[in-house]
Amino acid sequence: MKYKVRIAEEDIELEVGHSGDATEVVVGDRVLAADLVRIAGSPVYSLVLDGRSHEVSVHRRGGRFELVVGGESYDADVMDERAMRIAEATGDVGAKQSGETVLSPMPGVVIGIGVAVGDTVAPGQGVVTLEAMKMENELKSAVEGVVTEIKVEVGQGVAQGEPLVVIE
């Protein structure tokens, strides 16, 4: 199946193919062997891509995904072939989303809040910094909007999935 992925302001087209137990990912002229396994009961996946192992935390927010890899957070839009055709037919390609609640991707402690109520934020702008497993994780807005509510304070412990900041 073909996918169009927008991550870190870059558009990537890829194709995922399965043959028996083997999975291949084709990106441009590169063919990569892939294995993706979800860690039971969690949003964390073990990804082996071309022989390199990665731990990836995946969180769905609306039609977007937040990926946490190596302590870095990335927002991604993913469309399969069918969704691409529908978006092209309806003129929704590249349409901006508005409104989101930034959720904690993991248990941790809030060590920084980079916005205030009333601030205008852009996609990819850092809003909250969490410390989890002795690593700092900057959580970013996936949308353009105005901060309407901050639900946490610096020093507060948070659970996975807990709302942190509301953006309208």
Image (spheres, grey):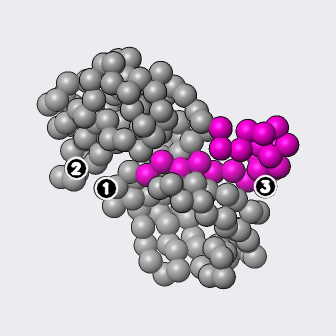
The CA span between labels 1 and 2 is: 7 Å
- Going by the numbered disc 3, the residue's amino acid type is Glu
Q: Position of residue 161 (x, y in %)?
A: 41, 33
User: In the rendered image, is residue 40 in sight?
Assistant: no
Q: What residue is drawn where x is 41% and y is 44%? A: 124
Dot 3 falls on a residue whose secondary structure is helix
Q: Disc 2 marks which residue?
A: 136
Left or right: 121, with 84 as reference point: left
79 in magenta = yes
Q: Earlier in the sequence, mark 1 or mark 2?
A: 1
For the magenta stretch, what is the residue range?
A: 74-95
Q: Quadrant of the N terminus?
A: bottom right
Q: What residue is drawn where x is 60% and y is 59%? A: 11
- Going by the numbered disc 2, the residue's amino acid type is Glu
Dot 1 falls on a residue whose secondary structure is loop
Left or right: 20, with 94 as reference point: right
Query: Could you tell me if the residues under marks 1 and 2 are in contact, i.e. CB atoms within 8 Å?
Result: yes
Q: Which mark is residue 130?
A: none
Q: Disc 3 marks which residue?
A: 81
Q: Which mark is residue 71?
A: 1
Q: What residue is drawn where x is 33% and y is 24%? A: 119
Left or right: 96, with 90 as reference point: left
- Going by the numbered disc 1, the residue's amino acid type is Gly
Dot 2 falls on a residue whose secondary structure is strand
Q: Position of residue 10 (x, y in %)?
A: 54, 59
Q: Earlier in the sequence, mark 2 or mark 3?
A: 3
The CA span between labels 1 and 3 is: 30 Å
Nearest to the observer: residue 47 or residue 152:
152
The CA span between labels 2 and 3 is: 36 Å
Q: Please tell me in which quadrant of the rendered image residue 69 appears.
A: bottom left
